[in-house]
Amino acid sequence: MAQLFAGTSGWAYPNWKPDFYPAKLAQAKFLGYYATQLNAVEVNFTFRQLVKDTTIQKWIAGTPAGFRFSPKAHQVITHIKRLKNTGDFLPRFMATLEPLAQAGKIGPVLFQLPPNFKIDLIVLEEFLAALPRGVEAAFEFRHISWFADEAFELLKKYNRAICVAETEERITPDVVTADFCYYRYRKPVYTPEERRIMVGRIREHLEQGRDVYGYFKHEETPQGAIYAVEVLREISPAK
């Protein structure tokens, strides 16, 4: 049965107290508490550092079965090499995530491209062909030139999801390119009507057999975490 995995982009935010985290909760216990409320998290940490195995093992041990981590691809891949000539670094990065995969706790890897990276179908296909098939992947295009049928068809060919990102400046076309979906809800505020539409779209995907990963904005306030809890409970109410 298809499932919704909902969360935020990160969890280590003391300013989420006391509205999300209990006021006296130690930061070392944030992830464990987070995982009692939500079932997935997007990991920005992996964008700048190759995560150590000891850290991965703590993540695994601190979360229940079925919890998912969606790591953001390292900046060397997306911003420095810009998907070109990644044959040396990509396997190294993916190897750091292998313990998550073995534990059944890895969600899609997010490849977030730079805003000034314009469409290049040749580069994209070469990268897609080199990407290991065993791990799901989503691509966040931040230049509008990528919002083209040719790019969408390439993603479909390799069963990779387009990351549907909503910000105050830009909304990615809500196109299905894989057997799962990936959303980044980045606006600071969502009205009740916007959340109703959001839930309806998620239900459409689930009814058609597609898992959905949805990550809300993080950092300054716990509002994104609160939204994520509300949506997860509406879609998957406790039995």
Image (cartoon, rainbow, N blue to C red):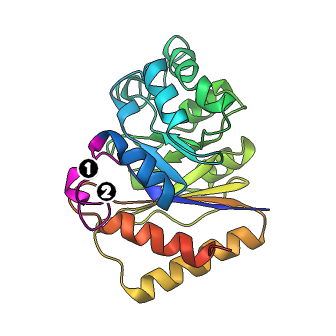
Where is the C terminus found, in terms of image quarters? bottom right
Identify the residue at horizontal 35%, vertical 48% (top origin): 11
Tell me the element at label 2.
Answer: loop
Q: Which residue is mark 1?
A: 13
Please report whichever mark, 1 or 2, sits nearer to the chain's N-terminal start.
1
Circle 1: residue type: Tyr
Q: Is residue 96 above or below residue 30?
A: above
| Picture quadrant of residue 101 | top right
User: Which labelled disc corresponds to residue 180?
Assistant: none
Residue 31 placement (x, y as % from top left): 41, 45
Q: Is residue 112 left or right of residue 2?
A: left
Q: Tell me whether the residue at label 1 lies in contact with that at label 2, contact meaning CB atoms closer than 8 angstroms.
A: yes
Q: Depth-wise, is mark 1 or mark 2 nearer the camera?
A: 1
The residue closer to the viewer here, 22 or 125, is 22
Q: Which residue has dot 2 on it?
A: 218
How crowded pointer 2 is (Cα within 10 Å; few <14, some 14-19, many 20+) is rated as: many
Span highlighted in magenta in the image: 10-27
Q: Secondary structure at mark 1?
A: loop
The residue shown at (68%, 28%) is 102
